[in-house]
Image (spheres, rainbow, N blue to C red):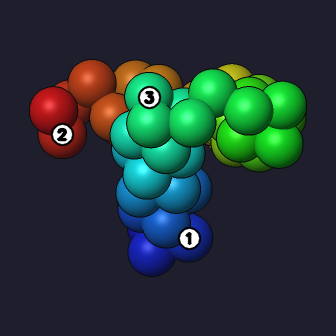
Amino acid sequence: MAEQAEHLKAYHAISHQVELDPSEKNLTRMAQVMEILDHQGLWQLDSRIS
């Protein structure tokens, strides 16, 4: 569960970073994190927490 929480934290952090700086680097990182969330089914966990 701790690893899953870290992925969700990373998503929220990079989302904020993209707001401030929508560079290719940040957008690529966001896509990578989103792929992990998709693959592990963590969107449902995020919606239960939020």
Q: CA distance from mark 2 to mark 1?
A: 15 Å
Q: Left or right: 23 with respect to 43?
A: right
Q: Quadrant of residue 20?
A: top left
Q: Dot 2: few (<14), some (14–19), or many (≥20) neighbours within 10 Å?
A: few
Q: Earlier in the sequence, mark 1 or mark 3?
A: 1
- The residue where tag 2 is placed is 49
Q: Is residue 21 left or right of residue 50?
A: right
Is 11 above or below relative to 39? below
Q: Is residue 26 visible?
A: yes
Image position, residue 23 (x, y; %): 74, 33
- Quarter of the image with the C terminus in it: top left
Q: Are marks 1 and 3 in contact (CB under 8 Å)?
A: no
User: Quick one: which residue is furthest to the bottom in this view?
Assistant: 2
Element class at badge 3: helix
What's the amino acid at mark 1? Glu
**In the rendered view of the protein, which quadrant contains the N terminus?**
bottom left
Residue at 71 percent of width and 41 percent of height: 26
Disc 1 vs disc 3: which is toward the camera?
3
Amino acid bearing label 2: Ile
Q: Which mark is residue 3?
A: 1
Q: Which residue is mark 3?
A: 19
